[in-house]
Amino acid sequence: MIQIPSGKDIVLLSKPSLLAHEVNLKVIDSKQAEEFVADFDFNQKKLFVDCDEDAFLEISPSMTLADKHLLWENGKIAIEPKDLNSILERMPKLSPFLAQDEFGKDLMLAWGKKESLLHALETGYGTYFSRSRNGKWVKGEESGHLQQLKRVYVHLNPFFIQYVTEQKGAACHTGYYSCFFRELGKNQSVSFVYPNKVGE
């Protein structure tokens, strides 16, 4: 049994397979999320939920893929400066930031600002915005579980950032490799994806 938080934006990720870098994203409200889970076809698709229960990962082989644009790869900006500036200008004040490992496994979904993206492009480390700290958050700067970026993509409709990264240790603060460590099933069942936390 999960408890979808009320009054928050809920992120729905959709992918054709569990290990894929192709991904679509939609932001919905908590009521829409409750209806989505209640009506979900568990016979045809898989559904995972993150640690905060405010992001869902749907595995749907028949989904239609949206375009993405490579921004940065292995330490180098991959687009023209004017194109980067255009993207930064149209970037919302707060956007979803998705981190995936090099095999396409989804690690975590957080939120970020323009400053988060610029810091990531400058340093090569997964960077977000912490609403609880009201400031920049470099994943792993305290725990050592850093995200060393390999590629950074931008999706424009809707706008979100996609990191492809080498994950040091656990991506989730709970100790699991991924924040999407629970799979939902019929009759509100919940099963754990990983038998152990990282290091156990």
Image (cartoon, grey):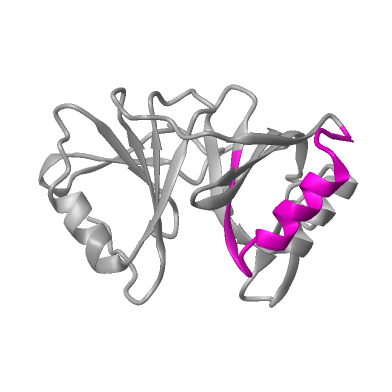
Asked whether residue 199 appears in the rendered view, the answer is no
Q: Residue at x 62, y 73 (%)?
A: 131
Which quadrant of the rendered structure holds the N terminus?
bottom left
Side of 132 where 11 appears, left or right: left
Quick check: is 95 in the magenta stretch? Answer: yes
**Count of numbered tags:** 0
Magenta highlight range: 75-99
Residue at point 50% right, 48% down?
157
* Image location (x, y in percent) of residue 20: 50, 24
User: Looking at the image, which is closer to me, 24 or 2?
Assistant: 24
Image x and y of residue 85, in percent: 80, 54
- Expressed as whole percent of the image width and height from the top left, the position of residue 54 reads 40, 60
Whether residue 59 is visible, yes or no, is yes
Q: Is residue 166 magenta?
A: no
- Residue at 32 percent across and 29 percent down: it is 63
Position of the C terminus, as image quadrant, is: top right
Quadrant location of residue 148? top right
Q: Is residue 77 left or right of residue 92?
A: right
The residue that appears at 52% across and 30% down in the rendered structure is 105
